[in-house]
Image (tube, grey):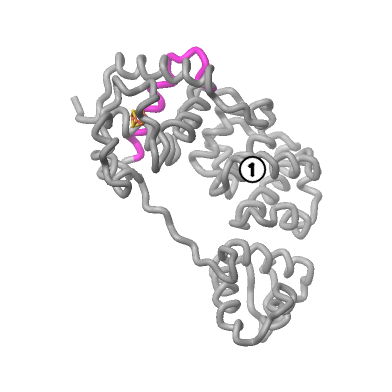
Amino acid sequence: MSSFTVSTTALTTFRQRLLAWYRRAGRDLPWRHTHDPYKILVSEMMLQQTQVTTVITRYQRWLKRFPTIQVLAKATTAAVLQEWSGLGYNRRPLALHNIAKLVVEQHHGKFPSDITELQKFKGIGDYTAHAMASFAFKQRVPLVDTNIKRVLGRIFFGYRKLETIRDNVGIFWELSRQLIASAKSPYDVNQGLMDFGALICTAKQPKCPTCPMRTICQSYPDILTAHPDRLRVKAKRTEPVFFGQPRRIWRGKILQLLHQHTTGLTVTAIGKQLQPDWDDTRQAWLQAVIATLVKDKMLVINGNRVRIKV
Ligand code: SF4
């Protein structure tokens, strides 16, 4: 028996307690009132790297402007980036827009329900494809993301081991598969896992004293006295901040601006549009931000002009 095998009894107890907790304390989120794959995808794309409270407002706003995949497919890139502005990580809206066009052009506006087919769209990875299969198509599929890994790892193996097995993602997919295998509602198990990681077994301050898993948790009670650095599955990447805003926000603003000026702009012209108090000592900073977009194949430089890569 592998040291990562978990007994059926432990898994069943965990699932029962998780579902009981979820029914009592789970979050009422707008995207849980729909099974429309387009809306589920919008929520999943927004939730990557963005706080749930921010996503709730922006999700509703987005759907007012682009209520269906057909409307999004017809929208201009500039409109899509404008609606996304402030959320950062602009690869996400560009991927979403591209997916919408492909689904409309090649799939008659209907998303395929097969995970392998979903993963063929650029921007839909392993996790998102499984989330769509579970939340939109109500399939019995497992789900693993950083939060679920943390929850399962802490409970079944202990937080000390988590550091050494965090990259062995197969262990967590298998555990998650076993958890939903005989569940009456795999949907609730997956949503419950997400909420449990977000509200109780959180990254920095797990709420062990009130946690229903205490008696089966391999981390409890040692975790209460653990150093905060030992609690994180992955060190958070720190993002540079310029003039009070993280780099991703500046990247978004640059892309949005250049989508309105399709023949391109000089670095100075971009700087002047972005910052009313622009002065040329900021050239190096702006060039460095633009260089990250060129590296990500979103912009090109022709002579002294920067423009969108078509
Ligand atoms: Fe997480 Fe603490 Fe609950 Fe264990 S007891 S599952 S570490 S919150």
- On screen, residue 130 above or below 123: above
Q: Is residue 194 left or right of residue 121?
A: left
Res. 173 in view: no
Q: Quadrant of ligand 1?
A: top left
Q: Residue at x 69, y 66 (%)?
A: 310
Q: Residue at x 55, y 27 (%)?
A: 134
- On screen, residue 42 above or below 75: above
Range of the magenta residues?
169-187
Q: Residue at x 75, y 43 (%)?
A: 61
Query: Percent from the top left, x then y, of residue 102?
Result: 70, 46
Q: Residue beneath label 1, please?
A: 55
Give the camera-side residue of 310 and 163.
163
Task: Kindly indicate the quadrant of the structure image that contains residue 121.
Answer: top right
Task: Kindly indicate the quadrant of the structure image that contains residue 2.
Answer: top left
Give the camera-side residue of 308 and 115.
308
Secondary structure mostly seen in magenta is: helix
Q: Is residue 278 magenta?
A: no
